């Protein structure tokens, strides 16, 4: 079975737990990180044990056809916006999106 390529949205302390858990399993690996800060791809890849490309433009990361799913690790007030953008780009989401965010998703077009 092919491993899913996962993009991380938001690179703070929550993301570090998600990346470690995703890369520890046999079904997925983190291959992309979106952050408002610039990161060194080689350093990220060495730190997390998978080839990672970093992005400072969310739309650019979501347009990467090699990314199958995203984990939303951004600030809670950004979850609805990021979940909608990911859904519109056809990406699966296995972040910690709560019920209030899901309710707002149906309001956006």
Image (cartoon, helix red, strand yellow):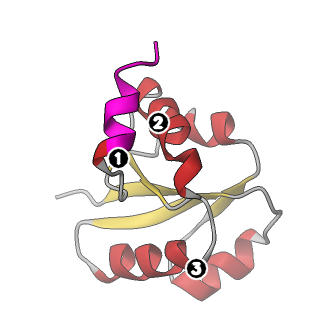
Disc 3: which residue: 13
Pointer 1 and pointer 3: residues touching (CB < 8 Å)?
no
C-alpha span from label 2 to label 1: 7 Å
**Which residue is at 40% across, 30% downward?**
104
Q: Tell me where residue 107 appears, x and y as whole percent.
A: 40, 18
Q: Is residue 96 above or below residue 41?
A: above
Q: Tell me where residue 56 appears, x and y as whole percent.
A: 76, 50
First in sequence: mark 2 vs mark 1: 2
Which residue appears farthest toward the front when viewing the image? 100
C-alpha span from label 3 to label 2: 21 Å
Q: Is residue 72 above or below residue 41?
A: above
Is 21 situated left or right of 42 in this image?
Answer: left
Disc 2: which residue: 86
**Which residue is at 61% across, 87% downward?**
47
**Which residue is at 56% across, 69% downward?**
51
Pair 1/3: label in front: 3
The crowding category of the residue bearing disc 2, from other C-alpha atoms within 10 Å (few below 14, some 14 to 19, many at least 20), is many
Looking at the image, which is closer to me, 103 or 92? 103
The crowding category of the residue bearing disc 1, from other C-alpha atoms within 10 Å (few below 14, some 14 to 19, many at least 20), is many
Secondary structure under badge 1?
strand
Disc 1: which residue: 93
């Amino acid at each position: 079975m092919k491993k899913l390529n996962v993009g991380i949205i938001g690179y703070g302390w929550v993301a570090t737990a998600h990346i470690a858990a995703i890369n520890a399993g046999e079904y997925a690996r983190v291959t992309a990180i979106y952050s408002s800060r610039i990161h060194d791809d080689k350093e990220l890849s060495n730190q997390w044990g998978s080839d990672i490309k970093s992005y400072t433009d969310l739309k650019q990361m979501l347009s990467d056809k090699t990314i199958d799913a995203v984990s939303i690790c951004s600030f809670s007030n950004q979850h609805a916006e990021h979940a909608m953008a990911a859904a519109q780009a056809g990406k699966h989401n296995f972040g910690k999106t709560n019920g209030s965010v899901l309710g707002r998703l149906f309001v956006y077009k």
